[in-house]
Amino acid sequence: MANSLVSILIPFKNVEEYFEECLESIRSQTYQNWEVIAINDHSDDNSLAIAERFSKNDNRFKIFTNDESGIITALRKAYEHSCGEFITRMDADDHMSQDRINTMLASLKEIGKGSLAIGQVKYFAKDGINDGYDRYAKWLNQLTADGTNFEEIYKECVIPSPCWMVHRIDLDVCGAFLPDRYPEDYDLAFRFYEKGLTCIPCNKTLHHWRDYNTRTSRTSEHYAQNYFLEIKLHYFLKLEYNTNKTLVVWGAGKKGKTIAKSLTENNIHFIWVCDNPKKIGKDIYGVKLIHYSELLTIENPQSIITVANEEEQLSIKSFFYDLNQKSAIDYFLFC
């Protein structure tokens, strides 16, 4: 395993407060045959100076400048300059557990090609983690422990963007960083899923995920909820949609309306159900909402669930269980 080079791709922009801790966590890895390909995405603080200082003292740190702008083009450039047989990503404001590279590489060596190494994550923040991020991390780690991440891919991004590793050949098969589709991490997760990669279970915390108010995922429009819904629907129609079944959208809240509007604009027929008496019978986007109980009369339905309330989701799952319908086959949670 000592002969295997691991390429660590790091786009960075204005992260001077955290960048040294990130790079030091890489330099301190128990596995040492790695290279960092760090791409400066037009920083105007001291981030580049920090990267160059590490590069000057250790030639495994290789620094380049993004000719264009944005994380996708930065990742493309990083990948173009990488030489490793194994590829992983890292966020410039986070830090790795000391055995992250060794643990991921060992699992990929054991399982072989066609697999995806992932690790458990832990959020941290100066002022504490909000409940939403805490619940997301617990949900993600539970999936990761069993390697069942792709079973809930339509709910949320199931692959932690800065904590995966893959054989280079498999990343190429998945299209690497070519698509211009945001959020880029969720899109790549879907392409891992599409090409049949299997998640290797992991019960170790390998990545420490920093949260703060100016983090890109909090501030960039590319990570707004509508982008997530567009990706979900894009891949659902590409990978799951069965024209021999009756498509059903369950829920008439904001997400349900967004999905319904997109289906209508693309001339895709669907039945729209909900349990809100104020909305049942209304005509929205030319589609009349009906009570969900009418699903009992629909032969061979395929349902998209857009209801966000977790208690209601449990009731919906129970409803489908009684109908002998299965998650990710007959119905898909989009929230």
Image (cartoon, rainbow, N blue to C red):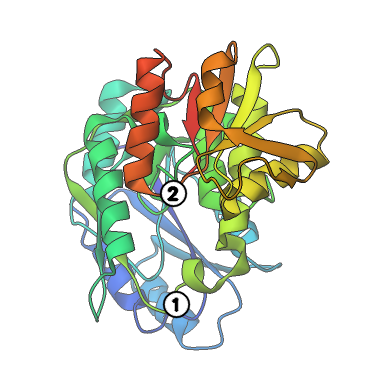
Q: Which mark is residue 52?
A: 1
Q: In the displayed structure, does residue 46 sit left or right of residue 20? A: right
Is residue 318 visible in the rendered structure shown here? yes
- Number of the front mark, 2 or 1: 2
Mark 1: amino acid? Glu
Q: Which mark is residue 308?
A: 2
Mark 2: amino acid? Ala
Q: Are marks 2 and 1 in contact (CB under 8 Å)?
A: no
Give whichever of 82, 210 is nearer the camera: 210
Task: Find residue 224 and report its image quarter.
Answer: bottom right
Which is nearer the N-term, disc 2 or disc 1? 1
Q: Residues within 10 Å of mark 2 (few under 14, many from 20)?
A: some
Q: In the displayed structure, does residue 175 sit left or right of residue 331? A: right
**In the structure shown, which secondary structural element does the residue marked by tag 1 occupy?**
helix
| Total numbered labels | 2
Is residue 82 visible in the rendered structure shown here? no
Q: Residues within 10 Å of mark 1 (few under 14, many from 20)?
A: some
Give whichever of 164, 4 is nearer the camera: 164
Identify the residue at horizontal 65%, vertical 19% (top origin). 246
**In the structure shown, which secondary structural element does the residue marked by tag 2 occupy?**
loop
> Considering the image in quadrants, where does the N terminus appear?
top left
Q: In the displayed structure, does residue 262 sit left or right of residue 150? A: right
